[in-house]
Amino acid sequence: MTIHKSKGLEYKTIIFLGLEDAAFFRFTDQREEDTAAFFVALSRAKNTLHFTFSKVRPFGRFSNQDRKIIADFYQALHDSGVVESKNHATSLEVIM
């Protein structure tokens, strides 16, 4: 399901696949819209969020992946004090 189709719906668990900067925040001229869409999707979770990312993709324009932009969101979730996060090599689990 896309982020836009999830608006107004709720689920126990939400999984973000491929949440690298180039995959999610690739359009610099619509950064605010991307951020708003991210928080719409984030707010659909009742209990748990899973974020996955790839360090390297063997195809496409963005073979080396970066997480500088999305790292700010990870840190904000961690600093909020209302979440428990479990860091893994290529994913982050947030338990609300």
Image (spheres, helix red, strand yellow):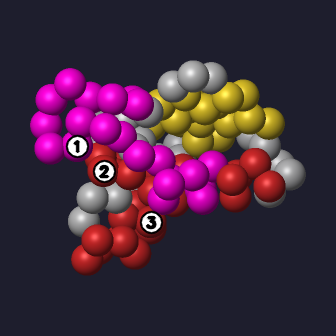
Position of residue 32 measured from the top left corner of the image (x, y, whole percent): 40, 75
Measured along the vertical axis of the image, is residue 27 above or below residue 30?
above
Measured along the vertical axis of the image, is residue 95 above or below residue 7?
above
Question: Toward which corner of the image does residue 85 lie, by quadrant?
Answer: top right
Position of residue 73 measured from the top left corner of the image (x, y, whole percent): 59, 56
Query: Earlier along the polypeptide chain: callout 1 or callout 3?
Result: 3
Q: Name the residue under label 3.
A: 35
Position of residue 27 measured from the top left corner of the image (x, y, whole percent): 25, 65
Q: In which quarter of the image is the C terminus?
A: top right
Residues rendered magenta in the picture: 54-74
Front residue (pair 2, 11): 2
> Label 1 amino acid?
Phe
Residue 22's label in the rendered image is: 2
Apparent side of residue 89 relative to residue 7 in the rendered image (left or right):
right
Indicate which label's residue lies in the foreground, 3 or 2.
2
Distance between the alpha carbons at the discs numbered 1 and 3: 20 Å
Q: Can residue 17 be seen in this view?
A: no
Q: Name the residue under label 1.
A: 62
| Secondary structure of residue under mark 2 | helix
Query: Earlier along the polypeptide chain: callout 1 or callout 2?
Result: 2
Apparent side of residue 27 relative to residue 54 in the rendered image (left or right):
left
Residue visible at 38% across and 51% down? 21
Residue visible at 78% across and 43% down? 83
Name the residue furthest left: 60
Residue visible at 30% across and 50% down? 22
Binning the other alpha carbons within 10 Å of mark 2 as few (below 14), some (14 to 19) or many (20 upward) gives some
> Label 2 amino acid?
Ala
Secondary structure predominantly adopted by residues drawn in magenta:
loop
Residue contact between numbered discs 1 and 2, judged by CB atoms under 8 Å: yes
